[in-house]
Amino acid sequence: KYASYGTHYVDLWVGTPPQRQTVIIDTGSSITAFPCSKCHDCGVDSASKERYHIDPEFDETKSGTFKQAHCRPKYASQHGPESKCSLGDCIYDNEEKNFCTMSAMYAEGSSWTAKESSDIVYPSGPHNTGLEGTEALKEHGVGAGMGDITDDRPFDWMDFRLSFGCQTKITGMFNNQLEDGIMGMDNRAGAFWLQLHQHYKRLGFKKEDGDVFDPTKFSLCYDRQPTSLDLAAGVGSGQLTLGGSDSLLHHTPMVYANNVSPSMGWYTVRVKAMFLRPNAGRLGDAKPHTKYYRVDATEEHLNGRPGDRSGIIVDSGTTDTYLSESLKSAFNDAFRKALDDPSAEYHNDPIELSKDDLKHMPTILIVLQGHDKSKLTGTQPDPSIAVGLVGHPNHHREMTRTSSNHKSQNDVNEHDVVVAIPPDHYMEESRTHPGVYVSRVYFNERFGAQNIFGSNFIMGHEVLFDNGMGRVGFAESHCNYDKYLSESDALLQNEERRTEATVESNQPPAELVGANDDL
């Protein structure tokens, strides 16, 4: 997975032979879409003709496995049975001219229009070269077999036919961004992970007790790269894990928050409290007797809307975090106390900071409603060992206390989840003016609008999106893929040495074998 200018993307290889399309990983939408050959001047500056996108448009005419979706409405039944679109809306002129149209419009004004299509795809693989397939695999796609465990244990999970939007028009940020398109990963029809899961079920997969791999899960681990790097070439900046999470990345045990409205298709967590802790740092960095300053607001205002099932969506496709404007005054009060500066004012204007200044900015601590079923089934760690739970004995206990000075009620309990946003995640340094920072947590959403935790909330964590259990997991993690590969290789080598040692210890002594032979 790679970093762009404020977003994270993954390679998606499409067609036979495969063509690369780079797509933003978006847990706030369901459709995968990217420009095709009829999207004229897409991803290009209209005046200079300079290309914004990493890759050329996907040329469907050069893929031997591409299919455009067609349809037939009820009123054309004289030509045959009704044929519905799986994701788009039917446009029918006649039997020769019909297609399924798709479109999306986003809050900041960007939009795209596409025709529903499908082709063989596989995610990731080598960044600059598509995998070559044998003649026998071309019918199914050249990525088939890329995940084989051994020669006699095929594993074709990573290669499948995906329905997607073949874009014919894009506007706004979709035209100017580095990435070619978008990969929808929410919990609605058409989501990439869901189509992958359905493909796996068609192969006969059935999850059994004890299986680590679960196709209803995926996780994201986002890293922040130095502003000095040129991101256009693709800079490794984290990890997308399909089928679960990977504890090798973790600094802290994974803890689980409730997805309060899974039927809506989003990953929505409910905020129960918000605190500011002085002097930066991650969850476990708090010194003894560290003061926590509570943002004195009701749960309604913390979540931006009324109702027990309301919450804030975790949206990996949005760079920043957007919270209710009704929170700003209470946040400002806590901000001044955390800085011990009555004149301090929280804002989103550029400000010059030294590295030492940044270390003295407060960490934002978000308390989320814990997942009760995880507690009942024993998959939620005990608070005594999990620093990500309110009940950890050496941290956070102050969060459960009430004060007569607070106007709002405090319902935090020991099984609620704590997520830390340190200042080096919410304060973003300018790429063109080093030492100049802007806070990317905004309090500008009207009350009743949908609030968003963007990628700066995910950063520094492996976040597990568990659709089967209706929960979202959080573990502070290093998210460094090169480090992960090094540690993974070391573990495999240690395991091989232990296996060899066990085999050798089970061999009878050589002289005893000789004595038996004499007998």
Image: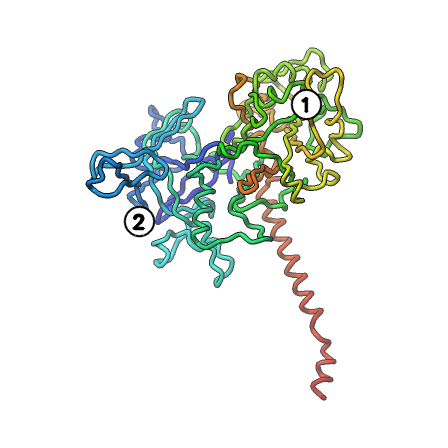
Q: Quadrant of residue 405?
A: top right
Q: Position of residue 439 (x, y in %)?
A: 59, 21
Please say whether residue 494 is visible from this viewpoint.
Answer: yes
Q: Secondary structure at mark 1?
A: loop
Residue occupying the point 48% across, 37% down = 187
| Mark 1 crowd level (few <14, some 14–19, many ≥20, 10 Å Cα) | many
The residue drawn where x is 76% and y is 16% is: 404
The image quadrant that residue 512 belongs to is bottom right
Which residue occupies the foreground of this view, 26 or 46?
A: 26
Q: Residues within 10 Å of mark 2 (few under 14, many from 20)?
A: some
Rendered view: 484 above or below 426: below
Q: Amino acid at mark 1?
A: Met
In space, the residues marked 1 and 2 are separated at their CA atoms by 55 Å
Numbered marks: total:
2
Residue for badge 2: 64
Q: Residue furthest bottom?
A: 519
- Circle nearer the N terminus (1, 2): 2
Location of residue 378 in the rendering, given as x and y in whole percent from the top left corner: 67, 44
**Image coordinates for residue 387, horizontal then vertical, percent:** 71, 36
Residue at far top of view: 343
Colour scheme shown: rainbow
Quadrant occupied by the C terminus:
bottom right
Determine whether, in the image, residue 261 is placed left or right of residue 366: left
Residue behind mark 1? 361
State the residue in front, 3 or 345. 345
Residue appearing at x 53%, y 19% in the figure: 448
Considering the numbered disc 2 on the image, is that residue within a helix, a strand or a loop? loop
- Amino acid type at image mark 2: Gly
Answer whether labels 1 and 2 touch (C-beta < 8 Å).
no
Which label sits on residue 52? none
